[in-house]
Amino acid sequence: AQRVTQPEKLLSVFKGAPVELKCNYSYSGSPELFWYVQYSRQRLQLLLRHISRESIKGFTADLNKGETSFHLKKPFAQEEDSAMYYCALNTGGTSYGKLTFGQGTILTVHP
Amino acid sequence: NAGVMQNPRHLVRRRGQEARLRCSPMKGHSHVYWYRQLPEEGLKFMVYLQKENIIDESGMPKERFSAEFPKEGPSILRIQQVVRGDSAAYFCASSPPTEGQPQHFGDGTRLSIL
């Protein structure tokens, strides 16, 4: 069965420190992975997806099929990065996006 | 583009009543998804619809829950005879008909059962 695990419910760092939000998945098919972010009082929005291999707001994430991981990283955290982050796996195949979400990690960046 | 619109934002019902949650997708989007988020949990897929068709309802509870996306008007998630365990946040997302496009989410409806 497909599953997404985000082992850290809460993560606190200081401004300027590196940050890594962990995500592991379990899926027998070819995975398509996303990171979604929810800032305070805003709706859930797409941060990045592994197939685009781009950096958004300084964040990157690399799909590691051997370790079944898709960790989100940023070398220098900013206060405005404080938010809830969800890792999600598309299990609908290529035809549509049936997303399986992790439980989310609340990131707090202290000044 | 106003984005995905869900209403109401908050809905309170007593046990046994019906709850109707509405979702208007983004302009140009013909695919709608419903997710449920129970307290302390991640979002869980419920159903995927296209206009007038249910494509995948594998995440829908077998009883009391139904969804539709008519030719005209918003998508509706309907919960009959609500129970306390239905209290959750219900999120709608939409995507365009082009394959592989990411989903855009609404603000969600927080359903509370008294």
Image: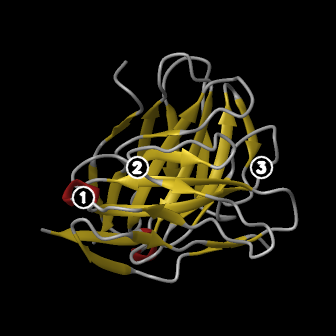
| Residue occupying image coordinates x 37% and y 49% | B108
Distance of label 2 from label 3 (alpha carbons): 29 Å
Q: Is residue A104 in view?
A: no
Where does the image place residue A108, in percent across and percent down from the top left?
25, 71
Which sits in the foreground, A98 or B7? A98
Residue indicated by mark 3 = A92
Q: Residues within 10 Å of mark 2 (few under 14, many from 20)?
A: few
Q: Residues within 10 Å of mark 3 (few under 14, many from 20)?
A: some
State if disc 3 and disc 1 touch (CB < 8 Å): no
Q: Are marks 1 and 2 on the same chain?
A: yes
Residue indicated by mark 1 = A78
Q: Quadrant of residue B84?
A: bottom left
Q: Are marks 2 and 3 on the same chain?
A: yes
Please tell me whether mark 1 sits on a helix, a strand or a loop: loop
Left or right: residue A57 compared with residue A69: left
Left or right: residue A52 compared with residue A110: right
| Residue occupying image coordinates x 52% and y 41% | B93
Q: How is the image coloured?
A: secondary structure
Residue type at tag 3: Gly
Please tell me whether mark 3 sits on a helix, a strand or a loop: loop
Chain of the residue that carries numbered disc 3 in the rendered image: A
Ranked by sequence position, the earlier of labels 1 and 2 is: 2
Where does the image place residue B113, in percent across and percent down from the top left?
32, 68
Which label sits in the foreground, 1 or 3? Answer: 1
